[in-house]
Amino acid sequence: MNYNPITALLIFFGISLLLFFVFRPKKGIYSLLKNMYHQEDKMIIEDILKFLYHNQTSNKHITTNHLTSTLEFSNDIIVESLKTMLANELISLEKDSYKLTTAGSEYALQIIRAHRLWEKYLSEKTGFHKEEWHERAEKKEHELSQSEIDKLSNLLGHPKFDPHGDPIPTKKGKMVSSKGIPLSSLKEGDIGKIIHIEDKPDIIYKQILAENIYLYSTVRVIENNPKRIVFHSEGEQFILAPIVAGNITISLLEKDEIQEENIARLSSLKFEETAMIVGLSKECRGESRRRLLDLGFVKGAIVAIDLLNPLGDPKAYLIKGTSIALRKDQASKILINRN
């Protein structure tokens, strides 16, 4: 086929332009695809490290079968990643069980640090619902560089715990230890403070969220038997199956640490009752906390129900001469003493 000079020139420039977009450094299609596959390899390795760390602290023996049956990657990719990790001395193989090396443990702790700091950021600085925190942090933990993780920690004031009560590793991999026992292990009459709510498995975590059980609230166990755990917290009664209560960690309180018994949630206030606000629950964070404080829900303020909603939610509360509408989940984070 014969081409005239202009056609040939256009074809030449077209091919040159195509090659430029495919192979140009950093931004070319080839470079982007290469980086994408590199990022996927990195993510798989980091997920394996994190899995080994969490299970190694429980003295579990993790084999290749454990990893392939648990992680959501193909068996071939996991096996190749394990070979890479062995070659880079991130893990060791003892008989058929994988163990983290010192370098592997340090790497795993930095991934855990990124995850928990990002969950803390989501809880304090955004409006995302708590059901979304873990999944979003699972993705973001692989994207943050070491310098970005340090900046995030500085932005948040170097927090020691994430919003579930899990300790956040420092840059050097150190963590605050907090000892507690499962709520399901408490005896009748025991009083304690919730210091951790496990967010896995997802189905149990959602049950805890649906009950509006809050971190750092005080609980008093009323009944404990193989079928159910009954306890009071912030003026309300809760009933959980033992398997659910087992995902809530409690720090037992001494007599001199026990707070006043008549603290309740604003959501429990009845029409024609008045109450004094004693504070906001620590469950109330970030912009939501600032908004409630700006609206006048501060310690010492007197509050009453101004208007009931025929549909139940929201209700209007009278505070400092102003009627403010709040949903039940908002009012449940305001703590009161009834007058």
Image (cartoon, rainbow, N blue to C red):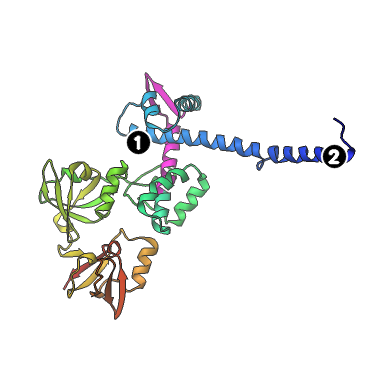
Callout 1, which amino acid?
His
| Residue located beneath label 2 in the image | 7
Classify residue 247 as left or right of residue 62: left
State the residue at coordinates (48%, 48%).
149
11 or 51, which lies in front?
A: 11
Residue 80 visible in the picture: yes
The quadrant of the rendering that contains the C terminus is bottom left
The span shown in magenta is 89-116
Q: Position of residue 109 (x, y in %)?
A: 41, 40
State the residue at coordinates (29%, 48%).
206
Tell me: residue 1, above or below residue 255.
above
Classify residue 232 as left or right of residue 206: left
Q: Is residue 111 magenta?
A: yes
Q: Position of residue 176 (x, y in %)?
A: 33, 46
| Residue located beneath label 1 in the image | 54
Quarter residue 2 falls in = top right
The quadrant of the rendering that contains the N terminus is top right
State the residue at coordinates (24%, 72%).
308
Total residue callouts:
2
Callout 2, which amino acid?
Thr
12 or 165, which lies in front?
A: 12
Looking at the rendered structure, the secondary structure element under dot 1 is helix
In this view, which residue lies farthest toward the front?
Answer: 1
Looking at the rendered structure, the secondary structure element under dot 2 is helix
Q: Position of residue 268 (x, y in %)?
A: 20, 65
Q: Residues within 10 Å of mark 2 (few under 14, many from 20)?
A: few
Residue 83's label in the rendered image is none
Q: Residues within 10 Å of mark 1 (few under 14, many from 20)?
A: some
Q: Earlier in the sequence, mark 2 or mark 1?
A: 2
State the residue at coordinates (46%, 44%).
139
